[in-house]
Image: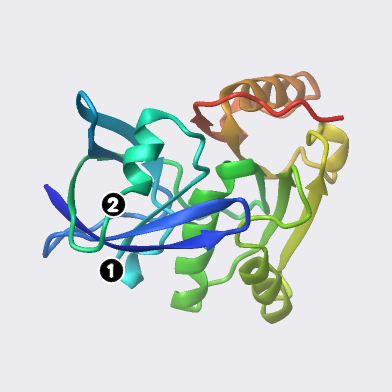
Amino acid sequence: MEFHFQGKREEADAATFLFTPPDGFTWTAGQSIKVEVAGPYGPLEHRFSISSAPYEGIIAITTRLSGSAYKNSLAKLQPGDSVKGYGLEGTFTWRESTAPLIFIAAGIGITPFHAILKQRIHEGAPVPVMLLYGSTTPDAIFAQEFDAWQRERPELSVRYIIGRHITTFDLPDHNEHLIYISGPSLMVDELSAELIERGVPETRLIRDWFTGRLPQLG
């Protein structure tokens, strides 16, 4: 299906690209989609979590511009250009539970959480969540929105982990929580293994793996 490019906005050390989807296109907050752009030698594709909330009716993808052939083609899009979107999928979505929730995000892994929380808050639904957000710099992506939401919603708590990796010691007493983890594959796998070793059942872990390297932090 064709998505039409609207424009982009800067997001700390990343950028959000906005697209108009075809009529009738729907998704659930937290899902991902493949976006195909024209590259120098043929089509290029990449999978992104959709960072916008469904109620907005706009497909937003948020990414760092790494200088790859794909990212360079993405950055060259002009308003009105079309790209192909397909392969909508994912179960990294809100699950109703009596257990409190912990959201753990590393870097660009924050994007599905942004969509999930934004949709819930728009609906007036409760957000009993502790968000642990790892960022290489204090200027974290979407930080202004998260800060505003936690001022409005006492049940939402946001803690930024700056310049180092998130560990199990950053979590509260977590054996009764439902834990969502989103970030680079190595981070998700290592943190999951630590949690399981500390007694968290794997059934309480909901994971979203991103491609990309883990930053060398303390």
Q: Secondary structure at mark 1?
A: loop
The answer to the question of whether label 1 and label 2 lie on touching residues, with beta carbons closer than 8 A, is no
Say if 19 sits above or below 55 in the image: above
Residue 195: image x %, image y %?
Answer: 74, 27
Task: Decide if residue 51 is in sight here.
Answer: yes
Mark 1: which amino acid? Gly
Query: Where does the image place residue 117, in percent across and percent down from the top left?
Result: 54, 63
Q: Is residue 37 left or right of residue 213?
A: left
Q: Residue at x 60, y 24 (%)?
A: 213
Callout 2: SS: loop
Residue visible at 49% across and 26% down?
A: 211
**Front in this rendered view, residue 214 or 90:** 214
Q: Earlier in the sequence, mark 1 or mark 2?
A: 1
Separation of residues labelled 1 and 2 (CA atoms): 20 Å
In this orientation, which residue lies closer to the viewer: 142 or 5? 5
Seen from the viewer's position, the closer of residues 119 and 98 is 119
Q: Which residue is mark 2?
A: 77
Residue 205 visible in the picture: no
Dot 2 amino acid type: Leu
In the rendered image, the vertical position of residue 135 relative to residue 36, given as above or below: below
Q: How many marks?
A: 2
Image position, residue 67 (x, y; %): 48, 33
Residue at screen point 62% across, 27% down: 188
Quarter of the picture containing the C terminus is top right
Q: Residue at x 54, y 26 (%)?
A: 212
198 with respect to 201 (left or right)? right
Residue 57's disc is 1
Q: Is residue 143 above or below residue 202?
A: below
Examine the rendered structure and indicate whether residue 91 appears above or below residue 20. Answer: above
Q: Residue 109 placed where, x, y %?
A: 57, 42
Question: Dot 1: few (<14), some (14–19), or many (≥20) neighbours within 10 Å?
Answer: some
Q: Horizontally, is 201 left or right of 17 in the view?
A: right
